[in-house]
Image: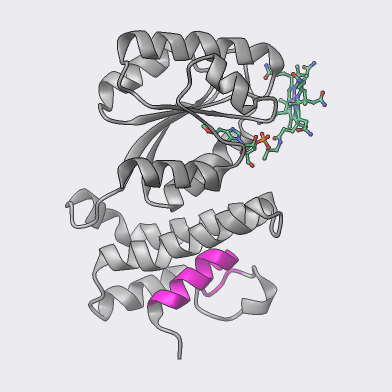
Amino acid sequence: MESILDQIALCVENGKINLTSPYPSAMRGQPGADEFTVQALEAGIPPSDIVSKGLIAGMGRIGVKFRENKVFVPQVLMSAKAMNGAMVHLKKYFVDGSVKRKGKIILGTVEGDLHDIGKNLVGMIVEGNGYEVIDLGVDVSADKFLEAIRLHPGAFVGMSALLTTTMANMEKINKAIKAEFPQVITCVGGAPLNPSFAQSIGADYYTDEPQALVEILDRLVA
Ligand code: B1M
């Protein structure tokens, strides 16, 4: 029989939130990430194991499948919902410090740009892989990024742009960040970008999909 942690990972991977949720149809009538997390806590499994071997394992798998085009946006959204169903029971362990995040990332779509579907997906997958995400939303100016960096020392910065016109703002923002906080690591992504653009504006990293960003962050915090 699969362990409770495997069951949690499976529920997150498949977007199974709780007993009553109808999705995915193959798992209808079965407990979800919600109930299995309660069971795991009652069985005395450390919350940190539930996070690392259950939630992060499941979100890691969906991130890889998304990269490989084996699943699409709706499945990732359902996985994030299942993860949030489990997180309801785990939040207090993050607050009391018994579960630690791997790191923090400030995320935003750059000034002038309102596209946030990709940025939100990046946020969900990065959060599901153990990072705290400070989401500044869309149309984020350099000043807003700088203010967030002051509030969250040690955080990485992730910027998204979907328009060729707002890529120029990304350069402006990256320059402002590096001028005030040269040690802050910046990552950029979004459909019109490419590695040489990222390099030309002085960003530290470029990725074209969320799981690759997780892998970069994991290497940086290792
Ligand atoms: Co807009 N739009 N749009 N739009 N829109 C595009 C981007 C466009 C390519 C459509 C086209 O002409 N074929 C085009 C841009 C052309 C260009 O500049 N090269 C365009 C345009 C022109 C515009 C307007 C100017 C249209 C107008 O008003 N005349 C306008 C601009 C508004 C503004 O931002 N100021 C506009 C408006 C909109 C809507 C508001 C209607 C809506 C956005 C809704 C929203 O986001 N809440 C919208 C949409 C939906 C699109 C398309 C159709 C889809 C974008 C999307 O969500 N893709 C898009 C055409 C297309 O892509 N087919 C288009 C799905 C998403 C999952 O992918 O965002 O690429 P993506 O994110 C990926 C990766 O890029 C990566 O990971 C994500 C997940 O895999 N990634 C990162 C993203 N950020 C990352 C950050 C990272 C790492 C990876 O590290 C930090």
Q: Is residue 5 left or right of residue 202?
A: left
Question: Would you identify the image quadrant in which residue 16 lies?
Answer: bottom right
Q: Where is residue 92 shown, x and y percent of the image? A: 24, 55
Q: Is residue 220 left or right of residue 150?
A: right
Question: Would you identify the image quadrant in which residue 84 lies?
Answer: bottom left
Whether 135 is drawn above or below 37: the answer is above
Q: Residue at x 60, y 52 (%)?
A: 77
Whether 34 is drawn above or below 115: the answer is below
Magenta span covers which residues? 5-21
Whether 170 is drawn above or below 8: the answer is above
Q: Residue at x 57, y 10 (%)?
A: 169
Q: Where is residue 207 shown, x and y percent of the image? A: 56, 36
Q: Is residue 119 left or right of residue 131?
A: right
Q: Where is residue 215 shown, x and y percent of the image? A: 46, 47
> In the image, is residue 8 part of the stretch drawn in magenta?
yes
Question: Would you identify the image quadrant in which residue 86 lies?
Answer: bottom left
Classify the position of ligand 1 by quadrant: top left, top right, bottom left or bottom right.
top right
- Give whichever of 137, 19 is nearer the camera: 137
Whether 54 is drawn above or below 72: the answer is below
Q: Residue at x 49, y 64 (%)?
A: 58
